[in-house]
């Protein structure tokens, strides 16, 4: 099934939504890595935000200092 063509406005709205989600996830990972928020708070935010809910656990763990792909 082919997707329909998006209008310029729809494409712009989708780009803005994607950018906002990336910024929100980046800020969350930064706050988590410096200890400003803890894991239960991340889970709480995931219930409220689709952007946070789509964050992969491995990405969150890798944001911690001293934790890399192997350790995570």
Image: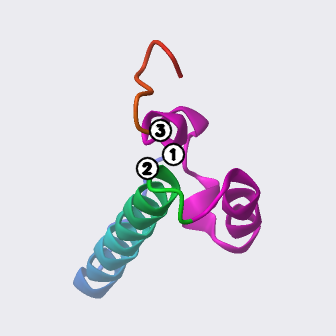
Question: Which one is in front, 44 or 6?
Answer: 44
Measured as percent of width and height from the top left, residue 33 is found at: 46, 50
Horizontal arrangement in the rendering, residue 38 relative to residue 25 (left or right): right
Region in magenta: 37-64
Label 2, label 1: how far apart the Cα atoms are = 4 Å
SS for tag 3? helix
> Residue 59 bears which disc, if any?
3
SS for tag 1? loop
Q: Mark 2 points at which residue?
A: 2
Indicate the colouring scheme. rainbow
Measured as percent of width and height from the top left, residue 24 is found at: 44, 69
Is the residue 28 above or below the residue 1 in the image?
below
Q: Quadrant of residue 45?
A: bottom right
Residue 6 is a magenta residue: no
Residue drawn at 40 percent across, 28 percent down: 66
Q: In which quarter of the image is residue 19?
A: bottom left
Label 3, label 2: how far apart the Cα atoms are = 32 Å
Q: Name the residue under label 1.
A: 1
> Residue 47 bears which disc, if any?
none
Of badges 3 and 2, the one in the foreground is: 3
Of badges 3 and 1, the one in the foreground is: 3
């Amino acid at each position: 099934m082919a997707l329909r063509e998006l209008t310029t406005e729809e494409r712009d709205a989708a780009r803005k939504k994607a950018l906002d989600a990336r910024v929100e996830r980046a800020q969350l990972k930064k706050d988590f890595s410096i200890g400003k928020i803890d894991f239960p708070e991340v889970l709480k935010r995931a219930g409220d935000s689709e952007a946070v809910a789509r964050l992969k656990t491995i990405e969150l763990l890798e944001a911690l200092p001293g934790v890399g792909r192997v350790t995570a």
